[in-house]
């Protein structure tokens, strides 16, 4: 009986060892699966973070390039504007000296006629003022105007560059036909013309 007790004891011990080995194998398999799942999830999270970081870096790079391009365009536009403004200043200088050229009388007559037509009244006051203009030549023009037109020769240039201002006697209707007013009326068209002539745009 001692021998069968010993066999029983060995069998129980053997079964317990087998079960313990199975439990350990299952636990190790579950641990390995858990580690693998964690590794896969960690890799997925890392890839997602890296993808987002790459997108943000690309967006920042494009933003920097875009701002540099805009800054360069603004610099070019600023330089072009300086050139156009320089041309305008040169034109203004030449216009302010028109009284000493042979183009003065025809331009003056045209300016006066335009201003008188624009006012369209019977009793009109026409003011004329140009730098370095001979008073005799201005007065002679006044004598050619309709009889109810009052002609005034200013001592100074009108609007700095010279020109003609006409209005009705009551001052309700005034038409400024000075060089400065004409430039302002044609401002956008003039700037476009100068720019396209200089830069071919």
Image (spheres, rainbow, N blue to C red):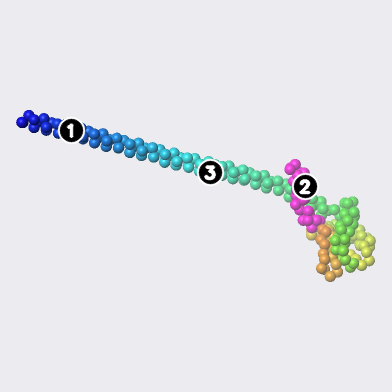
Highlighted range, magenta = 179-201
Q: Is residue 173 above or below residue 23?
A: below
| Residue depicted at 82% across the width and 53% down the height | 95
Answer few, some or many: residues within 10 Å of disc 1's Cα (few below 14, many 20 plus, some between 14 and 19): few
Q: In the picture provided, is 163 more to the left or to the right than 146? A: left
The alpha-carbon separation of the residues under discs 2 and 1 comes to: 104 Å
Residue 44: in magenta span: no
Q: Is residue 13 above or below residue 84?
A: above
Is 105 in front, or is 77? 77
Front tag of 3 and 2: 3
Is 42 in front, or is 133? 42
The disc label shown at residue 193, or none: 2
Residue 112 visible (yes or no): no
Residue 77, percent from left and from top: 68, 46
Q: Earlier in the sequence, mark 2 or mark 1?
A: 1
| Callout 1 secondary element | helix
State which quarter of the image contains the C terminus.
top right
| Residue depicted at 47% across the width and 40% down the height | 51
The alpha-carbon separation of the residues under discs 3 and 2 comes to: 39 Å
Residue 41, percent from left and from top: 39, 40
| Residue depicted at 65% across the width and 47% down the height | 74
Answer few, some or many: residues within 10 Å of disc 2's Cα (few below 14, many 20 plus, some between 14 and 19): some
| Callout 2 secondary element | helix
- Identify the residue position indicated by label 3 in the image: 60
Question: Mainly helix, strand or loop, the magenta region?
Answer: helix
Q: Is residue 159 above or below residue 17?
A: below
Q: Earlier in the sequence, mark 3 or mark 2?
A: 3
The alpha-carbon separation of the residues under discs 3 and 1 comes to: 66 Å
Front tag of 2 and 1: 1
The disc label shown at residue 15, or none: 1
Q: Earlier in the sequence, mark 3 or mark 1?
A: 1
């Amino acid at each position: 009986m001692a021998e069968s007790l010993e066999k029983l004891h060995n069998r129980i011990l053997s079964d317990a060892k087998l079960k313990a080995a199975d439990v350990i194998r299952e636990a190790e398999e579950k641990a390995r699966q858990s580690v693998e799942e964690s590794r896969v999830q960690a890799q997925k999270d890392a890839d997602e973070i890296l993808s987002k970081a790459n997108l943000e870096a690309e967006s920042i790079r494009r933003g920097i390039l875009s701002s540099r391009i805009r800054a360069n365009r603004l610099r070019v536009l600023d330089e072009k504007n300086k050139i156009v403004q320089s041309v305008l200043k040169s034109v203004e200088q030449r216009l302010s000296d028109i009284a000493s050229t042979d183009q003065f009388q025809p331009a003056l007559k045209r300016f006066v006629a335009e201003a008188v037509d624009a006012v369209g009244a019977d009793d009109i006051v026409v003011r004329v003022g140009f730098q370095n203009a001979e008073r005799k030549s201005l007065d002679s023009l006044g004598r050619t105007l309709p009889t109810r037109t009052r002609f005034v020769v200013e001592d100074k240039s009108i609007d700095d560059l010279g020109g003609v201002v006409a209005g009705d006697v009551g001052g309700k209707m005034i038409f400024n036909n000075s060089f400065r007013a004409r430039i302002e009326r044609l401002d956008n068209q003039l700037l476009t013309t100068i720019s396209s002539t200089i830069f071919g745009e």
